[in-house]
Amino acid sequence: MPQPLTVADFDYHLPSELIAQAPAATRRASRLLHVDAVGDMFDRNFVDLPSLLRPHDLLVFNDTRVIKARLFGHKATGGKVEVLIERVISDNQALAHIRSSKSPTAGSSLRLAESVDVSVLGRAEDLFILQFESPVLEILEQYGAMPLPPYITHTPDAQDDQRYQTVYARAPGAVAAPTAGLHFDQEMLGQLEQQGIARAFVTLHVGAGTFQPVRVEQLSEHIMHAEWYTVPPQTTEAIARARAQGGRVIAVGTTSVRALESAAKAQQAAQTSPTDSFVLAPQSGDTRLFITPGYQYQVVDAMVTNFHLPQSTLLMLVAAMIGLSTMQAAYAHAIAQQYRFFSYGDAMFLERNRTL
């Protein structure tokens, strides 16, 4: 019997100077570590990605748009608060993380950005339910700050407003960028289209939980944070076409992976009897899908992704695609070669190891 996986299997030491604090000069100027289906590694540049794709391959992007989810203010008692919107649940309500010296209570009020009055309705697990006087998204756009990850130390500026957002972002709702997509510019998208590489979109609103390490020793005990996703009919049709033509489904980012695989899991759960062939159907809803080594991918054949935090669920998802030992070797290689890590860092192109 193999030993159960523990969080220590996904730990590594990263020199702080390898954490990218700003984006590359241009979106496509990053490096690309290519790990093929047998675990061989190649140091490339992101501009090489089109040469690694084949006719009839399908790229699936997450078109979520990052909202300016961070607000600062104070309680009625005068104590300072920092609010990070986690999810907009209706026009005027949101779930939020609140940092303050003492947690606000139900029925209390907050004054944010010296302009916005908010009522605290209560709690939903570790989040606060907030009532705004006008549409949340409008308030955030006017008064909020881009929610840069905790490892980026500068105050968000105009460059972040542009570069911590994909060029194809459409549906507002994420509080963290789907960072693999940050490397694509319109010129590369046009090049891929001319090359015959199809593209499709899913939406998964990335939550702040994406930055949280797994806090239990045994992975089987971890409870995944919930995120809302949708896989529309146009995308399932594009996947069926790619499959019929012998192409691969290549997810751009771990969030696209989770959306596609969550749709597959939801569909399988709804089926009353097994079928010989699996054809993905449109799906939408909340997902807590936790992908770890041993998971059998149903939809995704390869992925573009950035380098992820130690002990994170995203690192475990990568290990499920290429194998734990290959993941560990790839990260050791990237550190030795001084790749840039995390949201503004370099990228990887990972081909699924089908022997796992």
Image (cartoon, rainbow, N blue to C red):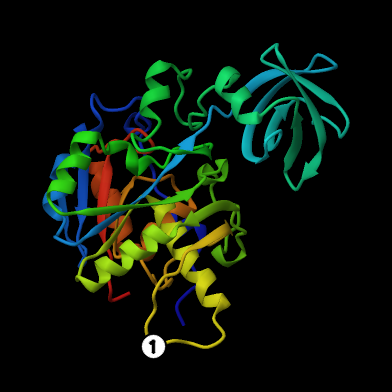
**SS type, badge 1:** loop
Where is 236 relative to 198, above or below?
Answer: below
Residue 314 visible at all: yes
* Along the viewing direction, whichever of 180 and 321 lies nearer the viewer: 180
The mark total stands at 1
| Quadrant hosting residue 26 | top left
Residue 291 visible at all: no
Give how far across and how far down residue 300 sits, in percent: 34, 64
| Residue found farthest to the right | 107
Q: Which residue is mark 1?
A: 276
* Along the viewing direction, whichever of 305 and 143 lies nearer the viewer: 143
Give how far across and how far down residue 72 sits, in percent: 65, 19
* Along the viewing direction, whichever of 195 and 337 lies nearer the viewer: 195
Q: Residue at x 28, y 65 (%)?
A: 352
Q: Residue at x 39, y 78 (%)?
A: 278
| Residue found farthest to the top | 114
| Quadrant hosting residue 85 | top right
Q: Amino acid at mark 1?
A: Asp
Give the quadrant of the C terminus: bottom left
Where is 259 relative to 343, above or below?
Answer: below
| Quadrant hosting residue 235 | bottom left
How crowded pointer 1 is (Cα within 10 Å; few <14, some 14-19, many 20+) is rated as few
Q: Residue at x 31, y 27 (%)?
A: 23
Question: In the image, 164: left or right of 27?
Answer: right
Question: In the image, 267: left or right of 167?
Answer: right
Where is 146 relative to 166, above or below?
Answer: above
Give how far across and how far down residue 101 sits, in percent: 76, 25
Question: In the image, 167: left or right of 139?
Answer: left
Q: Residue at x 30, y 50 (%)?
A: 331
Where is 202 relative to 190, above or below?
Answer: below
Give how far across and how far down residue 342 sits, in percent: 38, 38
